[in-house]
Structure formats: structure tokens, C-alpha cells
Image (cartoon, rainbow, N blue to C red):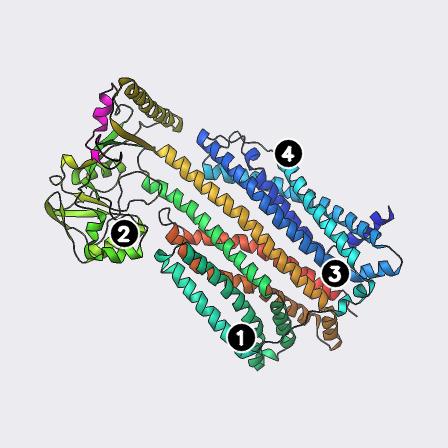
Amino acid sequence: MMLLKLSAHNIRKSLRDYAVYFFTLIIGVSIFYVFNALEDQTVYLEFSQNQREMIELLSTMLSGISVFVTCVLGLLLVYASRFLIKRRKKEFAVYLTLGMGKTRISVILFYETLMIGAGSLIVGLAVGIGLSQLMSALVANLFEADMTSYRFTVSTDAIVQTILCLAIMYLVVIALNIVVIGKVKLIDLLQAEKKTEKIKLKRPVLCVLIFLIAAAILGLAYYQVGWNYAELDEKRMAGCIAAGVLATVLIFWSISGLLLRIIMSIKPLYYKGIHSFTFRQISSKVNTMVVSMSVICLMLFVIICALAASFSMRNSLNANLQELCPADCQLSFTRYADDAEDMYDETEPGDIVEFYASYGFDVTAPFEDYVHFPMYADDNFTFADMLGDKLDEFRESYPFLIYDRGMELVSYSDYNNLMQLYGKDPISMGADEFIVLCDFQSSKVILDDVLESGMEVTIFGKTLYSRYDECQDGFVEISAQHINAGICVVPDDVVQESGIRTDYLIGNYPDGSKAEKAQTEETVLQMQADLMDAFDKSGATDTFMIENNTRIDIYEAAIGLGAIVTFMGLYIGLVFLITCGAVLALKELSESVDSIGRYETLRKLGVEEHEISKSLLIQTGVFFLLPLLVASVHAVFGMKFAVHMLEAVGTQQRLGSILATAGIILLIYGGYFVVTYGCARGIIRKKQP
């Protein structure tokens, strides 16, 4: 009982020292609960079957990530415990001097760890339960679900998982604490405050040389991922990543030597107040944390890119749905030649309406309005043919594009009829002209290049000229992504029936509620299933494919994908952010403990308290800001690469995504900065005369 009371007294006395520890645990516990309670929190929201399956998939993925989160938080607890033990070495020395055994000290640590764990668990769960209600609203917003049946819920499964994971982490921490206490010697504890890390001064010329080399390496890596991305393969990508990591380490190594030298060269700044002390402290901290700050910088880079890209992708998908999915349903019919060596090598003309009618079904009946038209292709007019002499150049720059595909063709009148259905403006062109429609960025770059100098093509034996010197924005198939790599609109008298490849029926359901439209869609899908049954029973040997694409399915798939990407990015990003903030905070507090004597010397020399506080604020600010600044520079080029990789999905509203990311970083990373400064200020004030 005496040891229990002593443990409680120690926690009250050292509450400021435990602030970062508490802050980390509370955030970690609340985040862990929120993401693991997702499925239980949304059980009362009204979702479709597809959306419910998406949420179950998301919950499964988040559960898997939680294992990684547990490991990360466990390592943080171990790192934090090392700081707390270091902070209290003199206290432990007093215990040993008074005759207390190491076993009793271990018991004290056990009680303290238990109390801290219980307190942080209770507060963290309370915060998590509150935040999880907001998470339900976020899920409802992302999935466009009905919240009328929602009610306040607490996930017992998530609570059990959180307690279990925290218990495992604390068992590891307690075991390591016992090992550490068992190995310490009284003389080491008594002299702990006298031991500081040795700082080796670096030669300025060498630092400048290393910095320039690192900048050159980074510049090359930035160029590869930002402007020469088309030539990146797995090996080059791995090389760019390795180069970025190496250059980051070298930059921090050189900065640790250059920072003080640069400030010293600016004599009015260096000799003003106690700036000489301040910048020597900063240089010392960076010098002892080159590898750690490099890792933190790279983690912040991943956080910025992951959060900004996931938010941008989600926003783009939502915007694309409004623009690229203007009809309720799209049916396509492709008939394949029976004598083709490969089933998909050759096609024959086919009509979807006639095919349905041949088995007694009216495929147009469920639609209020529709457009029925074929897409054509000329075997002698491929994507490669359009590029002409520039084919080899583009094939080398854009190796992932398919160059031997036949260019898709649509007649002028069919396309304008489709635009009328889509509610878009019609196009106009002459009898000997053609128009290229494209919204897939890589293809558009290529096609714009060849169209700019004027283009003459031969389609079905007729010579046509491009109406415009660049691609026009347009598409035929409904989608949530910009996937049109090139379609040619040609005059009606150019196309030939023998060139029909795929027959389309695109239409809208009768106006009605969401449920009524879903019922109409079920009718369309059931008709297709009945058609396939009738075909199987008929014994026919036709080879064909009927595909359906509906606005409801596209919406649910796009919204589900956006939600999964958002939650995955948030979960991993928040955990990494906690890790970065906690490591920097604990290192800064550890340095403050080691520097207590230096601050006492400043006071004896007559330095005012507000000057000391200002110095500490500058030190802490630079310490937190430096890795964030380098990470932000990395992120500029990382996001440029992400734009290329996500070009089909789009990266619209990037500014809003970046602002949201900045807000999250400011809240958590900035929170660690504030807590760290407050705790460090308390540490250096404890020995005031």
C-alpha cells in the first residue's frame, strides 16, 4: 500500500513531465477506438447492399492496419518510458541510497504505468466515443446515407480491442522497465545529469560539399518523378526512393554543421541577446538527431502526400460523377466472329435491340428516353496510325499506352443525339472533317501534339481533315473517371456497317424517387438475366458479350472507393503524425533535462526569465519546423507525381485538400509543439535559485 501511495504521489508531482505521455496515449487510444468502431457505429445508417459490403471491406482493412498501429504505438510507449526513466534517474538514486531494492523500484514503476494506462484509457475512450459519433456523420456524408435512423452507440468490440492492445503494449513496457532498472548502477544514476552527448564539430567546407551533393541528388530524383515519370519502371522508382532517402539524411547532416556557421557569420544577429546560446543549442539538437529527423521528415512527407492525395482523389471522384455520369444506364453488345482464332480477335456487326427482341424482350421498355447507336472501327486506322512519324518518340515516352488498338469511331449524328441525352452542347463540323474527343491526359498530350501541325487521315477510304488543332473534351461511355483515350467523330457517310464493333443503348429511367429508380434498374438487370437463361435453353452457339453500367453502381463504387481511400489515408496519416510529434517532443524534453545546468548558469549571469523562455521557444520551434519544411518541399514534387498517377481519377480541388491536410497537421503536430514547449519550460524552471 505504501508503494501504491508513493506511485500516486509521484504521478501528481511529475504531472507536467507526463503531459506528452498522456497526450500521446489519449490521441492513440481515441483514434484506435474510432476506426475500429466504424462498422458498429454505422449499423443504424441506411445503406444499400453494395455500400454495406464496402463498409465491411473497409472495416476488415482497418482491422489489419490496427496491428501495425499497435506496433507503432508500442514503440512510442517504449521510447517515452525511456525518457521518463532518464528524467527520474536522480530520484531512483535517492531510493537506492535509502536502502530501497530494485524490485521495489520496479513495483513503483509498475503501479505508475498501471495508473497512467488506466487514466489515459478512460480519457481516450471518452474522447474516442465522442469522436466516433462525428465519424458516423462523416461516413453518412461520404456514402450519402440516410441518418434518420441513427442513434448514439458505443462499440463494446472496439473497447475490448482497445483495452487488449493497450494491455499488450503496457506489458512490454513494464517488462522493459524492469530490465532497465535491473541493469542500472547507483553511480550511473548519481552522475546522470553530468553525462551529455559529445558533439563533434563538422568542417564547413565538407558540410557545404555534402549539401550541394544532396541537393543535386534530390534535383535528379525530383526531375525523374515530376517530369520524366513516363520512363519510370520498378527499378528506377526504387532508385528514386533510395536517392531521396539518402539525400534527406545528407541534408540534415550538412544542416547540423552549416546552421551554426551561417548564423555566426551574421554577427549582428549572432551576438544579439542570447542568440549565441540559442543557436548552439539548436545545432547540438539537430547534430544528435540526424537520422531521427530524417526519418521524421520522410514520415511527414508520406503523411502530407497520403492525406492530400486521398482527399483530392475523393473530391475528384465526386466531381467526376456529376460530369461523367449523366445517364442512368448504359448497355453494350459485342458479337464475336465464330471462326476467330481467339474469341476476342474479331467482331461482327450486332444490334442489341434486335438481339433482345429475338428472344422476346423489349430492352427499350424500362427507359423513358434513350439513344441507340453503334461504335465503329477501321482495321487500317489505329492509334499508331494517327501518330505517324512520331510513333517511336511517343512509344518511348509513354510505354504504358496501347498503340495498336483501332481508333474508336462514332458518327456525327449519333454523337449529337447522345449529347442531347447527356444535356451537353452539340458539335458541328464539315463533310470532310473529323474531331478527336479525349479526356485521358496522357493520350491528350500525344494527340494534341500531332493535331497541332494539322492532320490528314484516311478512314474507310475517305480522306478527312481535323477540324481543330487539339483534342476536344468529350466521351461516350458513362464513368466516374476520365478514361477516354481517344474517339474520332466522323461524318455519317464515312462509317460502314461492316465496321461496327460494339452496339450501345444508353438511356434514362422514368423520373422518380431513388427507390423507384433502383426498382427500374432491377428490372433492366433481371431482363438481362432472363435473356441469358433463354439463350442457354435455345442451344444457340453465338459468341457475344453484354455489359451493363449504371449510374447507381458507378456512384456506389466511386463513393465507396473514395471513402476507403480517405479512411486509410486518415488512419495511417494520423498514426504517423502522432509518431513524429511524440518522438520530437520526447527528444526535446530529454534535451531540456540535460540542459538544466546551462539555464541555471544563464540566470546567474543575469539573463531575464522572458529571454530564456524566448530562447526555448525558438529552439523548440526550429526543432519542430525544420523536418516539416524539408518534408513540404518533398511533398510538392511528390504531389506532382501523384497527379500523373491519378490522372484517370483526377486530382481536382487540390487546394482544398492541401488546406485540409494542413489543418490536421497544425492540430496534432502543432499540439505536440505547444505541449512540448510548456513541459520543457517547466523542466528548466524547476531549479531556479
Location of mark 1 (residue): 207
Q: For the residue marked with disc 3, what is the amino acid?
A: Arg
Q: Which mark is residue 532?
A: none
Location of mark 3 (residue): 87
Quadrant assignment for the N terminus = top right
Whether tag 1 and tag 3 are in contact, CB under 8 A, the answer is no
Q: For the residue marked with disc 4, what is the amino acid?
A: Thr
Q: For the residue marked with disc 2, what is the amino acid?
A: Lys
Residue located at (20% from left, 30% from top):
350
Q: Earlier in the sequence, mark 4 or mark 1?
A: 4
Residue located at (75% from left, 53% from top):
177
Query: Within 10 Å of the Cα at label 1, are there few (<14), some (14-19), or many (20+) other Cα atoms?
Result: many
- Quadrant of the rendered structure where residue 585 is? bottom right
Location of mark 2 (residue): 444
Residue 349 belongs to the span the image colors magenta: yes
Whether tag 2 and tag 1 are in contact, CB under 8 A, the answer is no
Residue 442 percent coordinates (x, y)? 31, 52
355 and 561: which one is in front? 355
Location of mark 4 (residue): 156
Start-end of magenta stretch: 337-360
Q: Earlier in the sequence, mark 2 or mark 1?
A: 1
**In 3D space, how far apart are the residues under numbered discs 2 and 3 (Cα atoms)?**
62 Å
- Quadrant of the rendered structure where residue 156 is? top right
